[in-house]
Amino acid sequence: MIPDRVKAILKTHGLTALEFEPGSTPTSELAAARIGVAVGQIAKSMLFKGKNGNFYLAVCPGDRRVCSKKMKSETGTKVRMARGEETETITGFRPGGVCPFGVEGVELLIDIGLADYPLIYPAAGNDASGVPVTFDHLKQITGGRVVDVMET
C-alpha cells in the first residue's frame, strides 16, 4: 500500500507508482528484475546519521556503493548507515521501501550517477513499488542537492 502522503505528492507532480506483490522489490536487484530495467536505474534511498547528530538521505544508483569519504566531504561529518528503527522513525518508511518524496527535516543528497539514465525508479514508500521519474523531475520534487558520493 502506497502511503497517502506519497500518493498526494505523486498526484501533484503527475507521477504514478508501479505496485507489485508485497515484499517483492526490497533490494535494487529484485526491483530491477521486477521492473525490467538496469540495476543502476533503481534509485535506492539510504539514510545516514552524522557524528553531528544530523541525518542525510542519499538517493543513489542501485548498482553502486556509497563512499564514506565522499559522504564526509559532502556532509562535513563522518556518517554511518542509520539503523532500521532510526530509518523508520526519521523518514516514516521501513528500510527497503524508503521514498525520497515527502521526507522532511533531513538533507536530501541525489547522486549524479542517476543522471546517466532517462528514467530512474525510487520506491514509493514500501518494498513493493517503484516510481518512474526523470533525474531532473526528482531534483525538482525533492529539492535535493546533487552530489557525487559513490565509489568509483
Image (tube, rainbow, N blue to C red):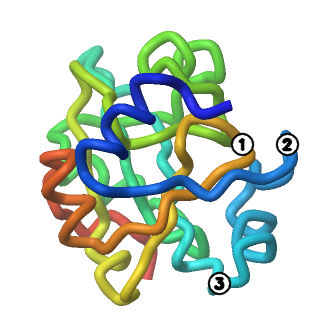
Q: How many numbered marks are there?
A: 3
Taking the spot 45% from the left edge, 72% from the top edge, the residue there is 120
For mark 1, give the secondary structure.
loop
Q: What residue did someone put label 2 on? A: 23
Taking the spot 13% from the left edge, 47% from the top edge, the residue there is 143
Viewport quadrant of the C terminus: bottom left
Q: What residue did someone put label 3 on? A: 37
Residue 91 is drawn in which quadrant?
A: top left
Q: Label 2 to label 1, Cα distance in Å?
A: 5 Å
| Position of residue 84 in the picture relative to residue 100 (left or right) | right
| Vertical comparison of 15 with 36: above or below | above
Viewport quadrant of the N terminus: top right
Badge 3: few (under 14), some or many (20 or more) residues near its Cα, within 10 Å? some
Q: Earlier in the sequence, mark 2 or mark 1?
A: 2
Q: Amino acid at mark 2?
A: Gly
| Position of residue 144 in the picture relative to residue 28 (left or right) | left
Badge 2: few (under 14), some or many (20 or more) residues near its Cα, within 10 Å? some
Q: What residue did someone put label 1 on? A: 127
| Vertical comparison of 82 with 140: above or below | above
Q: Amino acid at mark 1?
A: Asp
| Vertical comparison of 56 with 29: above or below | above
Q: Amino acid at mark 3?
A: Val
Viewer-proximal residue among 65 and 117: 117
Q: Position of residue 111 (x, y in %)?
A: 31, 66
For mark 3, give the secondary structure.
loop
